[in-house]
Image: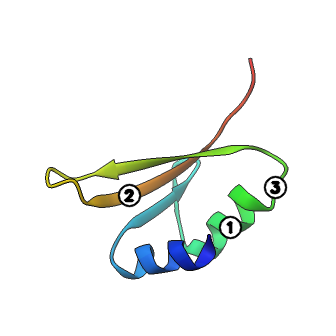
């Protein structure tokens, strides 16, 4: 996962965890290593290219 995120980041895709801009290693530390589920949302521009990936913690009600 980290290598894919680094490649995207290097191509200009912005990464966010819980609405905070982060680097790929921070995504891995939060979204992968923590014992909390995170969901990735991909934000596309008008041409269908990914511009942002937002990882948000999923909580149960």
Query: Quick one: SS at disc 3?
Result: loop
Q: Crowding at label 2, few (<14), some or many (≥20) Cα neighbours within 10 Å? A: many
Q: Which residue is mark 3?
A: 34
Horizontal and vertical percent position of residue 20: 53, 55
Tags 2 and 3 in contact by the CB under 8 Å rule? no
Tags 2 and 1 in contact by the CB under 8 Å rule? no
Horizontal and vertical percent position of residue 48: 21, 53
Tags 3 and 1 in contact by the CB under 8 Å rule? no
Q: Crowding at label 3, few (<14), some or many (≥20) Cα neighbours within 10 Å? A: few
What is the residue that sits farthest to the top in this orientation?
61
Query: Quick one: SS at disc 1?
Result: helix
Along the viewing direction, whichever of 50 and 59 lies nearer the viewer: 50
Q: Which residue is mark 1?
A: 28
Residue 8 lies, with reference to residue 31, above or below; the image says below
Along the viewing direction, whichever of 56 and 42 lies nearer the viewer: 42
Left or right, 32 with respect to 3, comes to right
Q: Distance between the Cα atoms at labels 2 and 1?
A: 16 Å
Horizontal and vertical percent position of residue 9: 43, 75
Along the viewing direction, whichever of 19 and 56 lies nearer the viewer: 56
Q: Distance between the Cα atoms at labels 2 and 3?
A: 22 Å
For the C terminus, give its image quadrant: top right
Along the viewing direction, whichever of 9 and 17 lies nearer the viewer: 9
Horizontal and vertical percent position of residue 42: 41, 50
For the N terminus, give its image quadrant: bottom right
Using the image, tell me which numbered label, if any, was put on residue 58: none
Q: Which residue is mark 2?
A: 52
């Amino acid at each position: 996962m980290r290598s894919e995120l680094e490649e995207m980041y290097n191509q200009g895709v912005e990464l966010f965890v819980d609405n905070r801009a982060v680097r790929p290693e921070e995504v891995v530390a939060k979204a992968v290593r923590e014992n909390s589920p995170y969901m990735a949302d991909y934000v596309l521009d008008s041409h269908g290219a990914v511009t942002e990936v937002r990882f948000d913690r999923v909580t149960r009600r």
